[in-house]
């Protein structure tokens, strides 16, 4: 297949604001792609070469792109830099300059998809002292034979800024449209949620249809999207919702880890699918030793502990383990315990369709409790009073609350879903607003006075899980300390965008836009109907969104969460409704 076909499709999608229209274009295109190329097509549509759980290391800097464009178009780097600044995007700059160049060049070899993928893999694999030069040459080699539109997307892919606006949900819709029936969509999404591998799902459906998709199961080495909890405003409501009887576990305040274990290797993934094995080598080794099964996938929370007293320490302590360097010291200085709470696979068996109590006893049967590998504290609770008692004990043990879990036969592990099979209740719920929000930074406003020269406030957004876009919900200017304000520009710079990113839906216009990536935890006084914010637009009142009043940063950066895992429109609406039911927050 020619890469031009794919680049033209990207161009058409990018011009389309409607997700439905994007889906239709993609679906038509998928039907024309051979089964051996569809996974590459799907990955490149997301600006990637591989599934979500592989680190994306293409990320070339603008400086290298400028060099490559300069070498290809025969224009001095300073001139290319000016055009990149003018266009606000190396991709469109490359497109413009290659267009001029093309008019003068006679010979070039059309780019095939295969050649592009090989070239990108070579760029990714260039290592060593002259790796920057190698990358530049490899890119320039591809640009030499590019049509202008191909150059635009090549440059965007290598900088990690694809921006065509087709997220995973749109791609799944398009796959369903192209190769299955509407009612098959949930099964296709399930296959994605248990593999986190869009390419594999695409290849399977194109080659083997829905029967093959339904046969996709959990496997060691492919992380699953995690199951999430709903929230309710009281312990009695929680017990009632779970039919008067449930399992309650302590809710530990640490880092969620999904461990994939075989006899000779253990890999630990964060909920954002980052490989955390080197951050928790002690936990990995202990899991390997204490797992009695041939293979298993187990989930738990890693919490920092004071080894002298055995007390659990606040969340900030375990974050010392998320460093990239100096891990040996961090392992010594910040000991952690892993509290196991779920088992998704064991001895070749997919456990996700088993009920909660069977999964729990399977953990006990397959893991030996050790010094640093423990079970979460759990009790079966049959009344609100017993629930309250357990909650008080959880707080006394320095946990942030409880997780109530359904003990019904249908209490399966629903990968990637937030539902009422699990309900969380935290100590800060007695405040007016139920729970904190995890919001994506999508814009910044320059500061004034003491904050002059820095960002003074941020534009924060929630996620629209139906449309795959982000809508604004507040302007956040409090809760920052000086150190954080100093760090902010550097933290946000990689995601800076010269124009409003295609996934953002906003009426409030900040000084600087960002692709949604950095997630901050925020509290607020209440949620109100807002004429200016776009989150939950039309859910409560036609033409109006919902906004958080008096938002405050809690100090916690949720770097364990993916942007699509931030607070959703339906959660914001649900919290608004809970608050309206009981305006005093009592
Ligand atoms: P929060 O910010 O409250 O942790 P979240 O959006 O990260 O919420 P939720 O599904 O709402 O995720 O809450 C569940 C989280 O609580 C899990 O992701 C996990 O990290 C943590 N956790 C701590 N203890 C438990 C437990 N016993 N069972 C399940 N999850 C637990």
Image (tube, grey):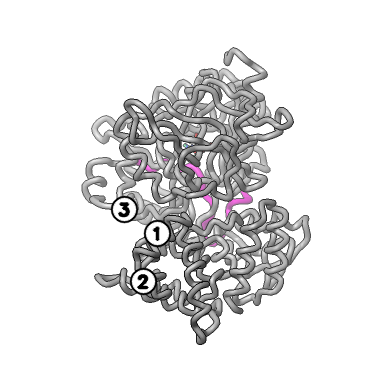
**Between marks 2 and 1 in the image, the one whose residue lies nearer the viewer:** 1
Distance between the alpha carbons at the discs numbered 3 and 1 = 47 Å
Q: Earlier in the sequence, mark 2 or mark 1?
A: 1
Q: Is residue 3 left or right of residue 393?
A: right
User: Is the CB of the residue bearing disc 1 within 8 angstroms of ligand 1?
Assistant: no
Vertical position of residue 122 compared to residue 262: above or below:
below
Distance between the alpha carbons at the discs numbered 2 and 1 = 22 Å
**Between marks 3 and 1 in the image, the one whose residue lies nearer the viewer:** 1
Q: Residues within 10 Å of mark 3 (few under 14, many from 20)?
A: some
**Between marks 2 and 3 in the image, the one whose residue lies nearer the viewer:** 2
- Residue 344 covered by magenta stretch: yes
User: Is the CB of the residue bearing disc 2 within 8 angstroms of ligand 1?
Assistant: no
Q: Earlier in the sequence, mark 2 or mark 3?
A: 2
Q: Nearer the viewer, residue 466 or 360?
A: 466
User: Is the CB of the residue bearing disc 3 within 8 angstroms of ligand 1?
Assistant: no
Please name the residue shown 50% across and 87% down the image: 107
The answer to whether any part of residue 556 appears in the image is yes
- Whole-percent x and y of residue 202? 63, 66
The residue beneath circle 3 is 281
**Disc 2 vs disc 1: Cβ atoms closer than 8 Å?**
no
Please name the residue shown 69% across and 69% down the image: 29
Q: Which residues are magenta?
A: 337-354
Q: Which SS type dominates the magenta stretch?
A: strand
Say which quarter of the image contains residue 36: bottom right
Kindly state the secondary structure of the residue where label 3 is placed: helix
The residue beneath circle 1 is 82
User: Tag on residue 135?
Assistant: 2
Kindly state the secondary structure of the residue where label 1 is placed: helix
- Whole-percent x and y of residue 301? 43, 41
User: Tag on residue 327?
Assistant: none
């Amino acid at each position: 297949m020619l890469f031009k076909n794919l680049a033209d499709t990207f161009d058409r999608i990018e011009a389309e604001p409607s997700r439905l229209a994007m889906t239709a274009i993609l679906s038509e295109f998928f039907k024309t792609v051979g089964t051996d190329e569809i996974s590459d097509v799907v990955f490149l549509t997301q600006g990637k070469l591989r599934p979500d759980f592989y680190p994306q290391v293409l990320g070339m800097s603008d400086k290298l792109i400028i060099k490559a464009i300069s070498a290809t178009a025969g224009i001095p780097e300073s001139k290319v830099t000016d055009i990149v600044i003018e266009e606000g995007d190396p991709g469109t700059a490359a497109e413009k300059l290659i267009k001029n160049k093309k008019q003068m060049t006679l010979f070039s070899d059309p780019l095939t998809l295969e050649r592009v993928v090989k070239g990108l893999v070579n760029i990714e694999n260039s290592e060593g002292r002259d790796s920057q030069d190698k990358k530049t040459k490899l890119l320039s080699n591809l640009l030499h034979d590019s049509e202008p539109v191909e150059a635009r997307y090549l440059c965007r892919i290598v900088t990690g800024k694809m921006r065509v606006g087709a997220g995973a949900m749109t791609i799944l819709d398009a796959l369903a449209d192209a190769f299955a029936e509407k009612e098959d969509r949930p099964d296709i999404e399930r296959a994605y949620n248990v593999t986190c591998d869009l390419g594999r799902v695409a290849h399977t459906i194109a080659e083997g249809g829905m029967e093959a998709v339904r046969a996709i199961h959990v496997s060691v080495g492919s992380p699953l999207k995690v199951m999430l909890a709903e929230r309710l405003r009281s312990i009695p409501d929680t017990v009632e919702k779970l039919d008067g009887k449930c399992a309650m576990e302590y809710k530990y305040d640490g880092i969620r880890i999904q461990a994939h274990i075989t006899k000779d290797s253990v890999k630990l993934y964060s909920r954002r699918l980052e490989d955390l094995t080197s951050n928790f080598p002690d936990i990995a080794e202990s899991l390997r030793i204490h797992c009695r099964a041939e293979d298993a996938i187990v989930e738990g929370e890693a919490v920092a502990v004071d080894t002298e007293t055995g007390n659990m320490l606040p969340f900030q302590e375990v974050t010392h383990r998320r460093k990239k360097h100096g891990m040996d010291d961090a392992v010594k200085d910040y000991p952690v315990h892993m509290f196991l709470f779920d088992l998704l696979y064991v001895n070749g068996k997919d456990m996700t369709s088993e009920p909660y109590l069977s999964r729990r006893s399977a953990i006990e049967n397959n893991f030996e409790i050790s010094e640093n590998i423990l079970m979460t504290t759990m009790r079966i609770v049959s009344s609100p009073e017993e629930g309250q008692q357990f909650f008080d004990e959880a707080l006394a043990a320095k946990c942030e609350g409880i997780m109530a879990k359904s003990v019904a036969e249908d209490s399966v592990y629903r990968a990637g879903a937030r539902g009422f099979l699990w309900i969380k209740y935290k100590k800060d719920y007695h405040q007016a607003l139920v729970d904190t929000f995890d919001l994506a930074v999508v814009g910044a406003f320059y500061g004034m006075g003491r904050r002059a020269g820095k960002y003074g406030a941020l534009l924060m957004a929630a996620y629209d899980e139906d449309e795959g876009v982000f809508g604004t919900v507040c302007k956040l200017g409090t809760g920052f300390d000086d150190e954080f304000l100093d760090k902010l520009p550097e933290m946000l710079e990689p995601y800076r965008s010269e124009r409003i990113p295609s996934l953002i839906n906003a009426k409030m216009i900040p000084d600087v836009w960002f692709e949604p990536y950095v997630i901050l935890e925020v509290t607020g006084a209440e949620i109100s109907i807002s004429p200016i914010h776009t989150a939950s637009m039309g859910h409560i009142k036609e033409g109006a969104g919902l906004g958080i009043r008096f938002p405050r940063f809690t100090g916690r950066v949720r770097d364990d969460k993916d942007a699509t895992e931030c607070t959703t429109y339906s959660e914001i609406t649900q919290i608004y409704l809970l608050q309206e039911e009981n305006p005093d927050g009592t």
